[in-house]
Image (cartoon, helix red, strand yellow):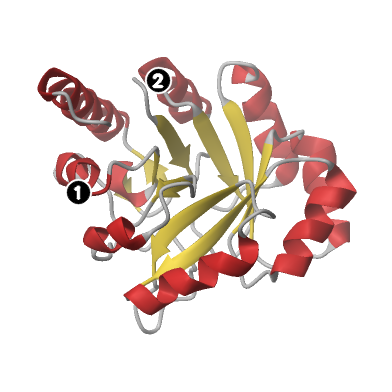
Amino acid sequence: MGIDIKICGLKTEEAVEEAVSQGATHIGFIFFEKSPRYIEPADAGRLADRVRGKAKIVAVTVDVDNDELDEIIALLKPDVLQLHGSESPERVLNVKTLYGLPVMKALSVRSADDLKRVEPYVGIADRFLFDAKPPVGSDLPGGNGVSFDWHLMRLLDGDVDYMLSGGLNKDNIAEALATTNAPGIDVSSGVESRPGVKDLELMQAFFEAVRRSVNSAAASGSRM
């Protein structure tokens, strides 16, 4: 489709296989115990093995130590590490050096000032994921089903590779893509019937909406 699509927070064989069959380029497994999408590393490894080589396997962690990363990497064998906490540029570099894997650094966005946090990570993180800041009272750094002002992405340096996340669903993905020309998108709660439960029909509808948007952009000569 010309755009990377990550389905995150997968927990079942059916959801993993549907995501890949629909065209997901990345599938994410969440190792944050407070999340309703949390999965044990061994279970994630078994699910990943079903589709390994068909999509990139992403391990999503939040401020974990090396012992936890050792276990996750040994059991999942991910292609990408997504650091979704408050990891410093130094920590990102340390993880990259230690494990020899690409790192996607997630950053929360609410205002233009938040994009300034990208600068210290440029040249260290291989990719960024921009998510909305969690609502007050939420224990989750992502997967809250809320979005931010997508027009802020126009302030970003065009050389910064990223995935757009935060509240994306079948009804707003066309607007999100038209506004940002994002090279990648990430969805979790937007394809769920309830927190942590992927809905195959919603997943299908999301991919169809993405395809329509990409085809429309191609027909009109847009960059997407």
As drawn, the residue found furthest toward the bottom would be: 136
Q: Is residue 23 left or right of residue 27?
A: left
Determine the secondary structure under disc 1: helix
The residue closer to the viewer here, 157 or 20, is: 157
Disc assigned to residue 38 = none
Residue at 39% across, 78% down: 113
* Circles 2 and 1: CB atoms closer than 8 Å: no
Residue 65's image quarter? bottom right
Which amino acid, by three-letter code, is at mark 1? Thr
- On the image, the x and y values in percent for residue 215 come to 18, 20
Residue at 83% across, 41% down: 100
Near mark 1 (Cα within 10 A), the count class, few <14, some 14-19 or many ≥20, is some
**Residue of label 2:** 23
- On the image, the x and y values in percent for residue 216 come to 13, 24
Inspect this view and state whether residue 110 appears.
no
Can you say which quadrant of the picture contains the N terminus?
A: top left
Residue at 22% across, 26% down: 214
Give the mark count.
2
- On the image, the x and y values in percent for residue 182 come to 34, 43
Q: Is residue 161 left or right of residue 89?
A: left
Disc assigned to residue 179 = 1
Residue 64's image quarter? bottom right
Residue 157's image quarter? bottom left
Can you say which quadrant of the picture contains the C terminus?
A: top left
